[in-house]
Each structure stands twice: as structure tokens, then as C-alpha cells.
Image (cartoon, rainbow, N blue to C red):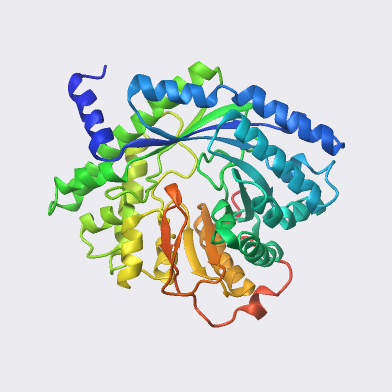
Amino acid sequence: MINIFEVNETNEMIEKENLDVRTITMGISLLDCITDDLERLRSNIFNKIISKAENLVSVGKEIEREYGIPIVNKRISVTPIALIGASACKSPRDFAAIAQTLDEAAKKVGVNFIGGYSALVSKGMTKSEEDLIRSIPMALSGTSLVCSSVNLGSTKTGINMDAVRLMGQIIKETAEATKESDSLGCAKLVVFCNAPDDNPFMAGAFHGVTEADTIINVGVSGPGVVNTALKKVRGESFEVLCETIKKTAFKVTRVGQLVAGEASRRLNVPFGIVDLSLAPTPAIGDSVADILCEIGLEHAGAPGTTAALALLNDQVKKGGVMASSYVGGLSGAFIPVSEDQGMINAVEAGSLTLEKLEAMTCVCSVGLDMIAIPGDTKETTISGIIADEMAIGMVNQKTTAVRVIPVIGKSVGERVEFGGLLGYAPIMPVNQYSCEAFVNRKGRIPAPIHSFKN
């Protein structure tokens, strides 16, 4: 039973410490929509999404009102479109037409984003997968709610360097195609190594082929709650620090479990997972970087940052995993630059560089996230950044990702405003030395020796 003290404590977290449920994401399988006729496929996709998600937003709002828990986003993820469109789509333009359908369906049901404009190419690319990837600039510049992801590597298969090279080009093309909005299209495009099938967070959400027909996944967030808790134990030992983070993560995840259970029951859709990631926002006091400072750093990026982040990530998982039977997605701590005011402050103070962020991704939940770089950055340099991050994920058997935004027409020292949850970002410098000869090699980097588990 929940006692009155716990009720009051949760209310305090919501009202003063930025506790929220970041998203209810409905995963929808489109496998039964497949046909070789493009117009019929588009109709099947639209009708399937409408029939399954028509009550998603209203149910989310009901739960918000009844429990007083803010649910920031309601989202949809679908089966990777490269698979769904393989029979009907003969060109990148055909795939872009499906992106339009996804956008129309998302607007019809009133969700904030729809993810799954995706391809899984960790070992090789089919023609349809390559066509979808080449359509991404067209798709993201012609829609407003569609998010795209491409999985380029895994611990089991290695890294598809042909796809890594192509994605450097596609990111630059997407930046150019959306340059009128400060290359915003790149904020809706992420590349992965070891992408999870059940991630509720955008831009990387897609509905894996191993999932049920429809599923409810919930992403919670609470950097402000953790930070407030740590202020009460300032100067205490690491043991006390770790126990405090674990207990707080447990409470935050229980809120997500409650919302997930209610959404599942009311929508008559199976509950999938709770993703207990600490996902920051631009709001003051809702920052992962501020937690690192409370642990004892002058700024994120100072010596000790990677160790502090490793501690935080591990304790969040240990506390959260006890609060739900099904923890999944990414789960841990996110370090997006533009979405975290503390990270922005650290970049502007000169303590946080791209290289330090890369080191931090070895121990956090995801990777180089929402990082604005100069618009004249070479395609091959972007591919090199991607390759480094894919290698970290592959060797460490973890999910890593890259969401970089080459802002056309802007350079180091300038800022770019994205608005909303995406925040704003300083343009960060990129190493100017070339990796072109490395990136232009054909083929793939083999899986590491420890991938052989059979």
C-alpha cells in the first residue's frame, strides 16, 4: 500500500523537482499491412495506425488529470519502414511517400512524434534499405512529426562501414534540406549500434519485429528529483551517495510503472517496458550535468566526469530495476547537449568538448546526442564520428548512438535555437584532421572476439 507520506513526496517531486513521465509510446506492428501496391500499402498503414492509436492521446490526458502526473509526450513507433515498404517501394521517392502517410496519421491521432522510419543494416543493405536511407532528407524535410533511425552496427555483426559512410552523406543532405529551420531535420535522425527494439524515446524509437502486434512502452524522467535528493547528502560517502540515487530511481520508476499499467489497461494493449532513463530538459533544475556537479564536479567535463557518470548510470539501473518487472529500452542517463542546460553551460565554459563527451558515452545510456557542429563539417568527418561511437557500442556490448546537427551557415561560437524539448545549443568545434582514407574503405569492421558466445 502507498501511504500518505509517499503521496506527498511524489507530489513534491512533480511540483518542485520536474518529475514527469516523458512519454507514453504505443508500438504498432505494420507487418500485416505489407502489399506490393504502394497506394494500398499507404492506406493500410494509415488505417492500422488510426485504429490502434485513436484513443492514445485522450487516455494519456485522462491519466494526467486523475493522477496529477505530467505526461509530456504521447508517441507512436512502428515496424521499420524499410521492411514494410520493400515490396511496394521501387525508389527513394516511394519511401518518402510513406513518410507522408506516417505524418498524416500522427497528426490525425494527435501524437507528438512517430518513429520507425528506420532501417536495420548492421551487416549489409538490401536495395529497399538503401532506398529508404537515401530518402531520409526528402522524408524529414517534407514532414513535421516523423523521426528516423538507422542501426549501423552490433556486437554480433560488427559495423557496416558502407552504411556509416552513406550516413555521413545523408546527415549533411538532411541538414541542407532543412537549413531554413537551422537544419532541424537532423534533430529527428539518429544512428545506432545495438539499437533496442523497445525504446520509447525519439528519435530512435521503432517497433521491433520480435514485439507483439501492439504494445505500450513508457519513458520516465527525473534528473531534478535525483539532484534534489543528492543535495540532502552533500559531502557524504560514496555508499550514502549510491544508496540515495538507488532509492530515488526506484520512486521515479514506480511512477512510470503506475502510468504504464493504467495506459495498458485503459487502451487494452499489453504493457511492454518502462525505460527509466534520466532524460533532461532545457528547464532549470532538470539537468544530468547538474547531478554530476552535485556529486562533486565544478563543471561537467572536469576530471572525474566519466567516473561520476558511470556511478550515476549504474545506480539508476540498480534502483529502477527493482521497481518494475519489465525494464527495457535504454535505461540510465542521457547526455544530450541542447536538451540539458547544465551541459550547455559546460560547453560554453570550455570544460566539455566533443572528445570528452565521447569518453562519457562509454558509460552512459546512449551516445553523442543533440550536438550542434559547424555546417561546413565534411561528410567523411561526420562518418568518422559515427564510426567511433559505433565502435564503443560494439566493443562494450551496449547501445550507442549519434545525433549530430551540422547547422548550415553557422560556425563555432554561434548558437542555434531548436525550441521546446530540443532546447538550444552552442556550435561545438570538430577535429579538423581528415579520416577520409579510413572512411572510404569498403566493407565492414568485423565483430569483436568476445561476441562469440555460442
Is 109 left, or right, of 42 in this rendering?
left
Q: Which residue occupies the foreground of this view, 91 or 226?
A: 91
Residue at the (77%, 35%) spot, across then down = 42
Q: Is residue 2 left or right of residue 273?
A: left
Kindly indicate the quadrant of the structure image that contains residue 323: top left
Residue 176 position by quadrant: bottom right
Up the image or down, 62 lies above or below 34; here it is above
Residue 195: x %, y % from top left: 57, 48
Asked whether residue 88 appears in the rendered view, the answer is yes
Q: Is residue 121 visible?
A: no
Name above or below for residue 99 compared with residue 370.
Answer: above
| Residue 105 coordinates in the image, percent (x, y) | 66, 33
Q: Return the residue found at the far bottom.
A: 433
Quadrant where the N terminus is found in the figure: top left
Q: Residue at x 35, y 36 (%)?
A: 20
**How many callouts does the rendering have?**
0
In the rendering, at what x and y percent does residue 94 appear? 80, 47
Viewer-closest of 238 and 361: 361
In front: 342, or 363? 342
Name the side, left or right, on which 14 lies relative to 116: left
Front one among 123 and 17 = 17
Residue at 25%, 40% in the rendered image: 17
Q: x, y (%) of residue 27? A: 59, 32
Placement of 246 over or under 270, stated as above or below? below
